[in-house]
Image (cartoon, rainbow, N blue to C red):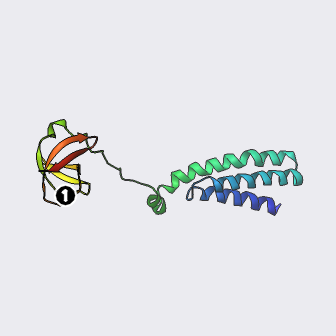
Amino acid sequence: MSVLIGLIVIAFALFFFEIFMPGGILALIGGVLLIIASILAYDQLGLTWAIIIFAAGPLGALLMFFLEIKFLSSTRMGKQLSLKSAISSQLNPRADENLVGQEGVTLTILAPSGKVLVDGQTHTAAVVDGFLDKGVPVRVVRTETFKLIVEKK
């Protein structure tokens, strides 16, 4: 009987730690331990207890999971595990075709890509041929998706 209780406790402990180390392995091992506990319950206590353990084990694990999510988020450790800030990011806008022929200056070394200042705005750019140092005057030759193609003026 103590082995049976031990298997159930270990299974629930593995379900608990699955929150901190997701991947399914701990939950799978916990599920296998519950099946073994059901088989042992059938041998020692009969069919009724085997069915109860087999059915109540996963239901208890699910209940424990939802309670853990609800109450863990209000603890100090739970707050460290969760992301509370929003991630704000955006793609560079498609380069404006009107910039072709405009002149600017390199803000970084273009080897072959970097940043340029054209028409008062910073753009990602690539040089047509070779590389350019910082502060070199450039002219926009064409635009590609998300970047300008420039050449030395």
The spot of residue 151 in percent (x, y) is 17, 49
Q: Is residue 144 above or below residue 17?
A: above
Name the residue that disc number 1 marks. Answer: 132
Label 1, residues with CA under 10 Å away: few <14, some 14-19, many ≥20: many
Q: Is residue 40 above or below residue 95?
A: below
Which one is nearer the viewer's eye here, 94 or 17?
A: 94
Q: Quadrant of the N terminus?
A: bottom right
Query: Given the image, on which type of amino acid does mark 1 rest?
Result: Leu
Which one is nearer the viewer's eye here, 3 or 141?
A: 141
Residue 56 appears in the rendering: yes
* In this picture, residue 78 sits left or right of residue 58: left
The spot of residue 102 in percent (x, y) is 11, 43
* Residue at point 65%, 50% (across, down): 61
- Secondary structure at numbered mark 1: loop
* Residue at point 48%, 62% (across, down): 77
* Residue at point 80%, 51% (across, down): 38
Residue 119 appears in the rendering: no
* In this picture, residue 87 sits left or right of residue 55: left
Q: Is residue 4 above or below residue 63?
A: below
The spot of residue 125 in percent (x, y) is 23, 49
Outermost residue, top side:
97
Quadrant of the image occupied by residue 14: bottom right
Outermost residue, front side:
129
* Residue at point 77%, 59% (across, down): 5
Quadrant of the image occupied by residue 40: bottom right
Which one is nearer the viewer's eye here, 88 or 108?
A: 108
The spot of residue 120 in percent (x, y) is 11, 48
How many numbered marks appear?
Answer: 1
